[in-house]
């Protein structure tokens, strides 16, 4: 059976850094970046990409819909 690994892509310029996605992640993958985007917000990013399972919780709770989740099957 193939293992599933996830990855997220955040639209950095549209992210307002509300942080709702951070506690929604069961694997503690997401954090707010110390750097800011063009609007001055600390945007979300994958701090621990190897732990992402692709559960989509972050994308579901994002009020602005700026997170896209990808799932990749890794052959075992």
Image (cartoon, rainbow, N blue to C red):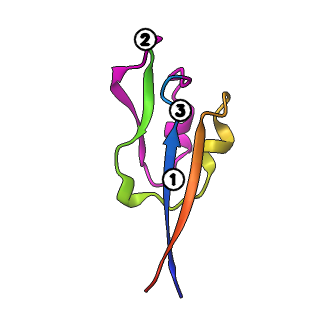
Task: Point out which mark residue 15 bears.
Answer: none
**Boundaries of the magenta span:** 14-40
**Which quadrant would the N terminus be assigned to in this image?**
bottom right
Query: Which of pointers 1 and 2 lies earlier in the amino acid sequence?
Result: 1
Q: Secondary structure at mark 3?
A: loop
Residue of label 2:
40
Q: How many labels were placed on the picture?
A: 3
Residue receiving disc 1 = 26
SS type, badge 2: loop
Q: Which mark is residue 11?
A: 3
The answer to the question of whether label 1 and label 2 lie on touching residues, with beta carbons closer than 8 A, is no
Place of residue 43 in the rendered image (x, y in percent of width and height, measured from the top left):
45, 26
Which is in the foreground here, disc 1 or disc 2?
2
The answer to which of 29 and 76 lies nearer the viewer is 76
Q: CA distance from mark 1 to mark 2?
A: 27 Å
Q: Quadrant of residue 55?
A: bottom right
Q: Nearer the viewer, residue 72 or 18?
A: 72
Q: Secondary structure at mark 1?
A: loop
| Residue pictured at 56% horizontal, 43% vertical | 24
Seen in the picture, residue 70 relative to 8 is either above or below; the reply is: below
Residue 38 vs 74, above or below: the answer is: above
Quadrant assignment for the C terminus: bottom left
């Amino acid at each position: 059976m193939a293992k599933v690994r996830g990855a997220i892509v955040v639209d950095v310029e549209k992210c307002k850094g509300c942080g709702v996605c951070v506690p929604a992640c069961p694997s503690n993958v997401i954090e707010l970046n110390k750097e800011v985007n063009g609007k001055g917000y600390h945007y979300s990013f994958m701090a621990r990409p190897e732990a992402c399972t692709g559960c989509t919780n972050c994308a579901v709770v994002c009020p602005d819909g700026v997170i896209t989740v990808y799932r990749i099957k890794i052959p075992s």
